[in-house]
Amino acid sequence: MTQVPPPAPVGVFVTPVTPLQQNCTTVWCTATGKAAVIDPGASVDAILGEVARRGLTLDQIWITHGHLDHAAGAAEMQEKSGVDIVGPHPDDLFWIESLEEKGREWGMPEARVFTPTRWLADGDVLTLGETSWEVYHTPGHTPGHVIFFNRAARFAQVGDVLFKGSVGRTDFPRSDHQALLNAIVTRLWPLGDDVTFVPGHGPVSTFGAERRTNPFVSDQALRGAPLARPASGPS
């Protein structure tokens, strides 16, 4: 009899949404089919349709931070599904309160303000089916940014903290470049070089690859001269 390894504990699919191609990420417990949608910035019906097509049950909505492209569709998704909105950290309340104003500015009139069912703090643990997700407060891009990490799957969704080859912008109100770098080095790197992550925009990478090659936060860059800031990039 051949021993069949158990399936991975977590499933993942990514739906780029909004003109900024934000990586709305759906994760689920493979044992129970319970799913969480991370950062539904738009395209709510399409995401819910894909969740249903895969035979999953939407259980929660998770928010990394309050920017328009990450959070504008949360209220609509909650209204249509009845599930809780979890996150971000309360320091991003001012961004959430500005969603409708920003939506008008960016041609997204469907953007709506919401009140999270639960705010998050560093060290919180979320349960999704039989899986556990660690929450890390990672300020810098926004003051209330959080990331979600599944230790068993060696997987993280990091929002706009870190990208393949770049880091989050810090030219927004209450952004802090040094705080962002500190969050990456003290909160992300200790999770392990083998961790695969989905960023808020662009391709998937690993923490190890970014420590080797990222021009902003590689080990070599951190030992060198003062780090540059991205002139522009994902929001």
Image (cartoon, grey):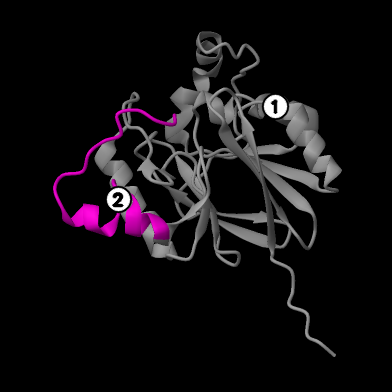
Task: Give percent across and percent down for residue 38.
Answer: 62, 41
66 inside magenta stretch: no
Q: Is residue 189 above or below residue 81?
A: below
Q: Magenta stretch mostly in which secondary structure?
A: loop
- At a point 74% along the width and 38% down the height, the residue shown is 83
* Separation of residues labelled 1 and 2 (CA atoms): 33 Å
- Which residue bears the numbered disc 1? 43
Three-letter amino acid code at the position of disc 1: Ser
Three-letter amino acid code at the position of disc 2: Val
Q: Is residue 118 left or right of residue 229?
A: right
Disc 1 element = loop
Q: Is residue 56 above or below residue 170?
A: below
Disc 2 element = loop
212 inside magenta stretch: yes
Mark 1 neighbour class, 10 Å CA radius: few under 14, some 14 to 19, many 20 or more = some
Q: In this view, does 30 lie above or below 176?
A: below
Do labels 1 and 2 touch, CB within 8 Å? no
Mark 2 neighbour class, 10 Å CA radius: few under 14, some 14 to 19, many 20 or more = many
Bounds of the magenta segment? 209-235
Residue 186 seen anywhere in this rendered image of the structure: no
- Which residue bears the numbered disc 2? 217
Label 1 or label 2, whichever comes before in sequence order: 1
* Residue 43 falls in image quadrant: top right
Which residue is nearer to you in this view: 164 or 64? 164
Task: Give percent across and percent down for residue 229.
Answer: 26, 36
